[in-house]
Amino acid sequence: MGVGDVMKRFMRCLAVLAAAAVLSAAKFAAEGAPMRILSLAPAATEIIFDLGLGDRVIGVTEYCNWPPEAKSKANVGDMMNVNMEVVVSMQPDLVVISNMNEHLKERTEALGYKVVVVYQDDFGQICDSILRVGEACSIPDAAKKRVDELREAVRAISAAEGLSGGADARVLVVVGRDADDASFGKIYAAGPGSFYEDLLADAGAKNAFSGDVPYAALSLEGLLRTDPDIIIELVGEHGMTGVDTQSILAQWKNLSDLRAARDGNVAVIRGDFTLRAGPRYPLILEAFARIVHEGAREIEE
């Protein structure tokens, strides 16, 4: 079974689990489960909606753009600098944040609100976070089923034909840079402490950047020293807007001293899904696998 077949089966199961989560949410609504959820992180929002709890969400941040229904919720603005007066005015009975803005936890709890933190540094943390949200929202069984499905999807993709040949390819994951800087004076690469480390391992590759931080700024000299076999550049909604994929690839091609660029082994994935450590992990894994093992160089969300 190929990667595409695995993902089709995964999406069918996802629809069934989402329906089950909705039924579970209705069952527990009368038993004191939180019904006014404020989500202050994109990954948290994706988890909540993925568990069929979107109807309970009363507010999200400006970066919470998935699923599309999230955009219809009240927008509280910047996830890093939340106005606590706004939080109080919304009267949530559960606030969900991430380890990216965990500094809000103490202030929010001081106001008397229950807070759940979702962590996103690796696949295990993503699964644990889904279970944590499910427990807080009184749908632990639905959350466990969802986690089991995600783990099975990852296992199936990793075991698909062509992905079991060993972690030979050294891949550099670029999570951000200034598209106007044709000199590549600074790029941001994913390190071993990020969830991309798991993605690369599950895709049958390894991280070309061996630093000791989750994300690092690399100069052109640092990029050349890394000398990866493959480069994957992630382009989200808030990054490099207005720059088409062919222009991005052309910029890389100009780096003749970089082996991956010279050999045409640079790939671009467009879409915020690649920047979210949440339930769409198998979709990111599928994209990585297509690049590493099938030679894909342009992938759109």
Image (tube, rainbow, N blue to C red):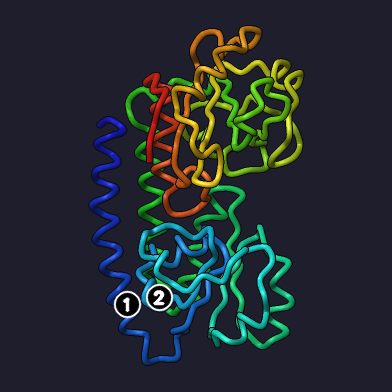
Residue name at image x 38 percent, y 73 percent: 53
Relative height, residue 8 to residue 78 (above, below):
above
Residue 206 occupies quadrant? top right
Q: Determine whether the residue tagged by mark 2 lies in a helix, strand or loop.
A: loop
Residue 215 occupies quadrant? top right
Mark 2 or 1 closer to N-term?
1
Q: Determine whether the residue tagged by mark 1 lies in a helix, strand or loop.
A: helix
Residue 5 occupies quadrant? top left
Relative height, residue 292 to residue 74 (above, below):
above
Residue name at image x 51 percent, y 37 percent: 235
How far across and down, in percent of the image, does residue 166 sit? 49, 22
**Image quadrant in which the C terminus is located:** top left
How far across and down, in percent of the image, does residue 60 sit? 51, 69
Relative height, residue 278 to residue 106 (above, below):
above
Mark 2 closeness class: few <14, some 14–19, many ≥20 residues within 10 Å: many
Disc 2 target residue: 139
Q: Does the rendering let one see residue 33?
A: yes
Disc 1 target residue: 24
Q: In the rendered structure, which amino acid carries the disc numbered 1?
A: Ser
**Image quadrant in which the N terminus is located:** top left
Q: In the rendered structure, which amino acid carries the disc numbered 2?
A: Ile
Q: Is residue 1 left or right of residue 114?
A: left
